[in-house]
Image (cartoon, rainbow, N blue to C red):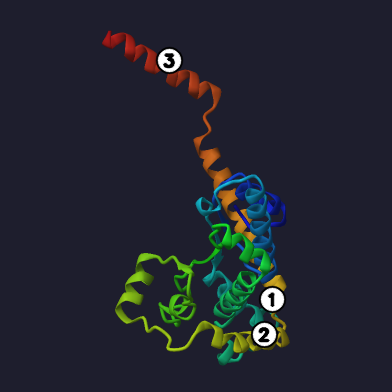
Amino acid sequence: MPAVKQGLEAMSACPAEGLSINVTLPFSLDRYDAAAEAFLTGMERAQDTGRDLSRIASAASFFVSRVDTETDRRPDRLGGGQPAALHGREAVTNGRIAYEHYERMLATERWKLLERAGARPQRLLRASTGVKAPAYDATRYVVDLLAPGVVSTMPEATLNAVAEHGAVPVGSIRDTCGEAHQVLEELAALGVEYADVAQVLEDEGVEKPGASWNELVEKLAVSPHESDSGQSHRTDRGKEKV
């Protein structure tokens, strides 16, 4: 289910009913925090009704590469030049700080009580890990965001690239969080508003599937005349066979 405001109650209601959920399209850290809060609330409700918490799973799926696609074009649109050192940095930055928020949630007493009751954490998931800009290394959205307990989904080309030349970082993702916060501040100074980037991506993420669905429905739609004609033709063929 999409991580929009309208979906927050469902994000609580589903775990409360024992249903596993995949929360998709949480581009902003605030939206991720809200989804994590909804998950905790749902698990607490499930516990109150005696459900087996170990059978309820959840993931929060961050779409990574889209963040850089939107961010990289903004300084030019705003009339400024983006320093090379900041080009293509926000997606990884966002993912690293999200992990910081994930660990913060795991340190709360609310989660510890649920964990002792058998609950499994809502895992972070990296989606859209294929690079869009040819200049970027094909492994960047995977190796730069490696962290314990995190799921990384990859298209085949990215999977092959990681297998062939992906270099696992020596340090921990925790060591990169201070730098990540600084990158956000520097981008903001250039006029790249983090909240606006996330909102644009969320709106697009919700609208595009709806547009695709409407297009499919239109293509499958058949006029009453065409439907009657087709039915008559099939009936006549059936009679001939008999």
The amino acid type, in three-letter code, at marker 3 is: Ser
Q: How many marks?
A: 3
Pick whichever of labels 3 and 2 is earlier in the sequence.
2
* Above-or-below relation of 46 to 40: above
- Residue pictured at 48% horizontal, 74% vertical: 148
C-alpha span from label 2 to label 1: 8 Å
- Residue pictured at 41% horizontal, 78% vertical: 139
Q: Residues within 10 Å of mark 3 (few under 14, many from 20)?
A: few
**SS for dot 2:** helix
Q: Which residue is mark 2?
A: 187
Pick whichever of labels 1 and 3 is earlier in the sequence.
1
Q: Quadrant of residue 190?
A: bottom right
- Residue pictured at 56% horizontal, 73% vertical: 69
* Above-or-below relation of 1 to 199: above
Outermost front residue: 116
C-alpha span from label 3 to label 2: 65 Å
Pick whichever of labels 2 and 1 is earlier in the sequence.
2
Q: Are marks 2 and 1 in contact (CB under 8 Å)?
A: yes
Would residue 87 be seen by someone viewing this image from the given angle?
Answer: no
- Across and down, in percent, residue 238 comes to 33, 13
- Across and down, in percent, residue 211 comes to 59, 49
- Residue pictured at 49% horizontal, 70% vertical: 150
On the rendered structure, is 196 left or right of 167?
right
Q: Which residue is mark 1?
A: 194
C-alpha span from label 1 to label 3: 59 Å
- Say which mark, if any, is on residue 232: 3
- Say which mark, if any, is on residue 24: none
On the rendered structure, is 55 left or right of 77?
left
**SS for dot 3:** helix
User: Foreground mark, 1 or 3?
Assistant: 1
- Across and down, in percent, residue 82 comes to 62, 88
Q: Are marks 1 and 3 in contact (CB under 8 Å)?
A: no
